[in-house]
Amino acid sequence: MEQHGEDVQMFLTWTPSGTGPHYEVKGTLSGNIIDGWWCSLNAKTNWYHFRAEVSPSGTTIDFSKTEDPIGSEMNTVKLSKN
């Protein structure tokens, strides 16, 4: 997965039923790194720095370098197409 300067937007949830909590991410994909900002749609918090690495296959995102001051416990997420 090699993109350069592509704007990305994601909506994330961490519950099996998809009821929340929900997060919004806006950023730019350069190479295999997404760099941008995220916020909690439930808590309506400030925007925090988001930096994630997309796997070469494009199926997972590693959030380990993302700022998480509200303790949302971002983890590696599996991606799938709708």
Image (cartoon, helix red, strand yellow):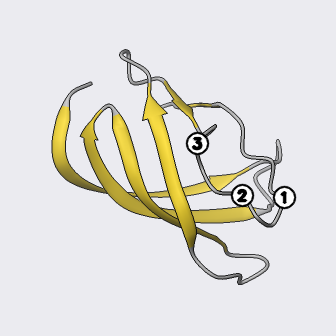
Mark seen at residue 65? 3
Q: CA distance from mark 1 to mark 2?
A: 6 Å
Task: Specify whether 76 is left or right of 73.
Answer: left
The residue indicated by pointer 1 is 71
How many residues crowd around disc 2 within 10 Å: few (fewer than 14), some, or many (20 or more)?
Answer: some
- Mark 1 vs 3: CB contact within 8 A: no
How many residues crowd around disc 1 within 10 Å: few (fewer than 14), some, or many (20 or more)?
Answer: few
The residue indicated by pointer 2 is 68
Residue at the image position 49 percent from the left and 41 percent from the top: 52
Question: What amino acid does circle 3 point to?
Answer: Lys
Viewer-closest of 70 and 60: 70
Quarter of the rendering occupied by the N terminus: top left
Residue 55 x %, y %: 43, 21
> Is residue 82 something that shows in the picture?
no
Q: CA distance from mark 2 to mark 3?
A: 9 Å
Residue 54 x %, y %: 43, 30
Viewer-closest of 17 and 69: 69
Question: What amino acid does circle 2 point to?
Answer: Asp
> Is residue 51 something that shows in the picture?
yes
